[in-house]
Image (spheres, rainbow, N blue to C red):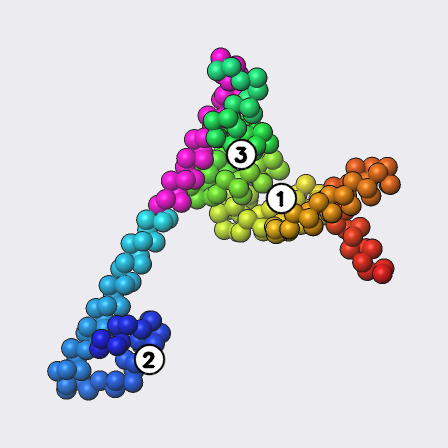
């Protein structure tokens, strides 16, 4: 029995089956009950931890709702000025409410956009929907499509929501990727972007430069 406790759940179940416990055996029933107690104990522990994690996630989402609303008011009423900040975005970044001016504007925008979208506002305020999904759909939702978007942000993944929002804007669907580059490779990539842009007479985005690199590689 001690060896059974020291293994993982799958192996423990396999060993329990190999025991072929005899219902008439007192020892067999004692072992069976001990294993069942352990399984139930671990299940209860997992469920309790799951409840704590989900509560923290919901709390974070509700905090984001309050933050968006307050940032919107700060911008609307110009209350950053008495605090000696030249712009609303400068204030938001300085106090840690946003990681960039763009992120500050997005949070305030979401709060204002949701004033005309009661269903989206409801799932946002209740913590059912993460702010990153609401941020994607709020600019394209209308009074007529409000309910559909509200259901989408609750039931679909972020990538799926983002793709639907891009389609609603008439844009081709994309998928965001992230990877690290050695510094020297990044420098070479930036040099390629700059030199190619100068040669073409226009400033290239990273996506456009990447597409050119793929086309060049395909022709070689």
Magenta stretch, main secondary structure, is helix
Secondary structure state at the residue bearing disc 3: loop
Closest to the camera, between mark 1 and mark 3, is 3
Percent coordinates x, y for residue 106 in the rendering? 57, 32
Q: Residue furthest left?
A: 26
Q: Is residue 136 visible?
A: yes
Label total for image: 3
Mark 1–mark 3 distance (CA, rounded to whole Å): 23 Å
Q: Which mark is residue 165?
A: 1
Q: In this orientation, which residue lies closer to the viewer: 122 or 158?
A: 158
Determine the residue positioned at 31% across, 53% down: 49
Q: Residue furthest front?
A: 184
- Badge 2 crowding class, 10 Å Cα cut-off, few under 14, some 14 to 19, many 20 or more, is few
Mark 2–mark 3 distance (CA, rounded to whole Å): 51 Å
Query: Which circle's residue, 2 or 1, is located before the other in the chain?
Result: 2
Percent coordinates x, y for residue 23 in the rendering? 18, 85
Query: Which circle's residue, 2 or 3, is located before the other in the chain?
Result: 2
Percent coordinates x, y for residue 186 in the rendering? 68, 47
Secondary structure state at the residue bearing disc 2: helix
Q: Are marks 2 and 3 in contact (CB under 8 Å)?
A: no
Q: Is residue 110 visible?
A: no
- Badge 3 crowding class, 10 Å Cα cut-off, few under 14, some 14 to 19, many 20 or more, is few
Q: Which residues are magenta?
A: 55-82
The quadrant where residue 63 appears: top left
Q: Which mark is residue 99?
A: 3
Quarter of the figure with the N terminus = bottom left
Query: Which circle's residue, 1 or 3, is located before the other in the chain?
Result: 3
Determine the residue positioned at 29% across, 85% down: 18
Mark 2–mark 1 distance (CA, rounded to whole Å): 48 Å
């Amino acid at each position: 029995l001690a060896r059974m406790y020291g293994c993982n759940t799958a192996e423990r179940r396999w060993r329990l089956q190999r025991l072929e416990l005899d219902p008439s055996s007192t020892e067999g029933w004692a072992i069976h009950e001990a294993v069942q107690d352990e399984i139930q104990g671990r299940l209860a522990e997992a469920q309790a931890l799951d409840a704590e994690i989900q509560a923290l996630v919901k709390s974070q989402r509700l905090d984001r709702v309050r933050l968006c609303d307050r940032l919107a008011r700060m911008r609307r009423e110009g209350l950053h000025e008495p605090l000696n900040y030249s712009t609303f975005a400068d204030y938001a970044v300085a106090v840690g409410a946003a990681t960039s001016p763009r992120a500050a504007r997005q949070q305030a925008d979401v709060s204002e956009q949701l004033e005309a979208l009661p269903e989206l506002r409801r799932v946002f305020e209740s913590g059912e929907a993460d702010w990153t999904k609401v941020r994607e759909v709020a600019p394209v939702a209308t009074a007529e499509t409000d309910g559909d978007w509200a259901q989408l942000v609750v039931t679909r993944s972020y990538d799926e929501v983002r793709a639907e929002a891009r389609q609603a804007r008439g844009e081709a669907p994309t998928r965001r990727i992230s990877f690290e580059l050695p510094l020297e490779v990044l420098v070479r990539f930036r040099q390629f972007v700059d030199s190619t842009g100068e040669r073409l007479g226009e400033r290239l985005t990273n996506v456009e430069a990447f597409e050119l690199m793929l086309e060049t590689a395909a022709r070689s």
